[in-house]
Amino acid sequence: MKTRFLFPYWCRYLGWALFLIHVPVVMLRKHLGFYAHSPGEGLLSSQHLFFMATTLLMAIGLFLVAFAKERIEDEQISQLRLDSLQWAIYLNYVLLIVSLIFSSDTQHILFLNLLVPLVFFIIRFQWKIFQNNRLLKKDGDLR
Amino acid sequence: MKNTIRVERAIKNITQAELAELIGVSRQTINTIESNRYVPSTVLALKIARVFNKPVEHIFTLEDTD
């Protein structure tokens, strides 16, 4: 089956690598001399560049993980992908609406909005694949 | 919808993995179809029927709830 708009299988490893690089960099932010970016500092200050670089690293990493092909990309996997994407969009909009009602911190809302769909999609999709594999192992020996 | 893939496989004496390879899907897909967790597309149903050399209706049948 032909699938469009998906990255090759190896992109998943590249994606995880980018994401894993981003984690320690953000955790060591203060040691590296960068503090949280505040809008008052203007564009292209060192804080802003650091923020952009780490956010891009994370977003591109998650994007590659989420939309890399599976080893065998067939119609059942496409169905799972679509299902998980629907769940991720639902959850994202629920969280977005709730946070817009109860918070005015738009910067963090934006950040949440960037993360939630991809992270939830990856978790839901991989969990379903894991379940399928477990069931296959359980009765896979039956002929 | 229910199906008789497991029975047909037993008659033809092939495993889930072999059937999967014959029609170009993963073993997981065959497993989910056999356990009624996934309804295959018409194309896939026709391919499965072709492997067993039987009409599609012989392998896939509607249930009252469909």
Image: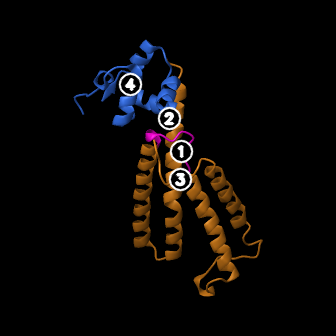
Chain colours: A orange, B blue
Query: What is the CA distance from the residue labelled 4 to the residue labelled 1?
Result: 32 Å
Q: Which residues are magenta?
A: A66-77
Residue that mark 1 sits on: A126
Per the picture, the main secondary structure of the magenta-coloured stretch is loop
Q: Dot 3, crowdedness within 10 Å: few (<14), some or many (≥20)? A: many
Q: Earlier in the sequence, mark 1 or mark 2?
A: 1
Chain of the residue under the numbered disc 3 shown in the image: A
Q: Do marks 4 and 2 share a chain? A: no
Q: Do marks 4 and 1 share a chain? A: no
Residue that mark 2 sits on: A132
**Residue furthest left in the image:** B64
Q: Which mark is residue B66?
A: none
Q: Nearer the viewer, mark 4 or mark 2?
A: 4
Q: Residue at x 77, y 71 (%)?
A: A31
- For the residue labelled by badge 4, is the local secondary structure a helix, a strand or a loop? helix
- The answer to which quarter of the image holds residue B57 is top left
Chain of the residue under the numbered disc 1 shown in the image: A
Circle 3: residue type: Phe
Circle 4: residue type: Arg
Residue that mark 3 sits on: A67
Q: Residue at x 37, y 25 (%)?
A: B49
Q: Evaluate if marks 4 and 2 touch, with contact meaning CB atoms under 8 Å apart.
A: no
Query: What is the CA distance from the residue labelled 4 to the residue labelled 2?
Result: 25 Å
Whether residue B39 is visible here, answered yes or no, is no
Query: What is the CA distance from the residue labelled 1 to the residue labelled 3?
Result: 12 Å
Residue that mark 4 sits on: B50
Residue B9 x %, y % = 44, 18
Circle 1: residue type: Gln
Q: Earlier in the sequence, mark 2 or mark 3?
A: 3
Residue A65 sits inside the magenta stretch: no
Query: Who is closer to the viewer here, A97 or A4?
Result: A4
Chain of the residue under the numbered disc 4 shown in the image: B
